[in-house]
Amino acid sequence: MSMAHRLDVRPGHKVLDVGTGSGYSAGLFARRFGDENVTSVDMDPYLVEAARTRLAEFGRTPRVAAVDATGELPEPEYDRIMATVSVRPVPASWLRALRPGGRLVTTIAHTALLITAEMGPDGVARAEDGSAPPVHQGGPRRLRDDLERVRGKWEENGRFPLHTLRAELTAEGGALLSPDGPWVFTV
């Protein structure tokens, strides 16, 4: 649900759900924002057909297609793209299809990074959230407190917290950038 929350879909937005799986996300988006505004894609034709059948049983009929989402997409433009599959790099087709002001939420393969990027009018999707995600602690051990102590040491030694990374994604490639600029990681 964190990814869907970060996506911040509004009425009238066209949504692309990459990684249909069971159809759960597509079903939630379709119920809330209308079947006609939701497209869900997956590479596995079996999963697509099973999801389509399951969704129909609940009266939902979003567009569900078996395609390789790293290639051409079923529609030319989307306001929101959520990928529950990890990618690296972010496919150029996603960035071409994301409207200016649109939002992309995905994870970068082989990392623990969850990117929430907004498409600028210049065709570059940028992520500069800078805020630490909320954490709810419970149980006898306060792991978040331990993490905060580690983070404090990290910052004390001139390092930066990962949640302050900026991301710039273009059809030609992408990069993660440190807050002060000299550190660049190609994604």
Image (tube, rainbow, N blue to C red):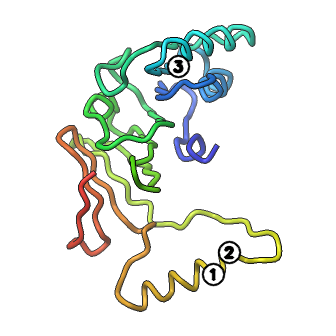
Specify few, some or many for label 3: CA neighbours under 10 Å numbering under 14, 14-19, or 20 or more: some
Q: CA distance from mark 3 to mark 2?
A: 40 Å
Give the residue pinned by disc 3: 37
Which residue is depicted at the point 82% across and 76% down?
A: 140
Judging depth in this view, the residue of 12 and 177 nearest the camera is 177
Q: Quadrant of residue 146?
A: bottom right
Give the residue pinned by disc 1: 146
The quadrant of the image that shows the N terminus is: top right
Residue at the extreme right: 140
Q: Are marks 2 and 1 in contact (CB under 8 Å)?
A: yes
Q: CA distance from mark 1 to mark 3?
A: 43 Å
Eyeballing the image, is 144 above or below 65? below
Element marked by disc 3: helix
Eyeballing the image, is 123 above or below 156? above
Q: Of the residues tagged 3 and 2, which is closer to the observer?
A: 2
Element marked by disc 1: helix
The earlier-in-sequence mark between 1 and 3 is 3
What amino acid is found at the position of numbered circle 3 in the picture? Asn
What amino acid is found at the position of numbered circle 1 in the picture? Asp
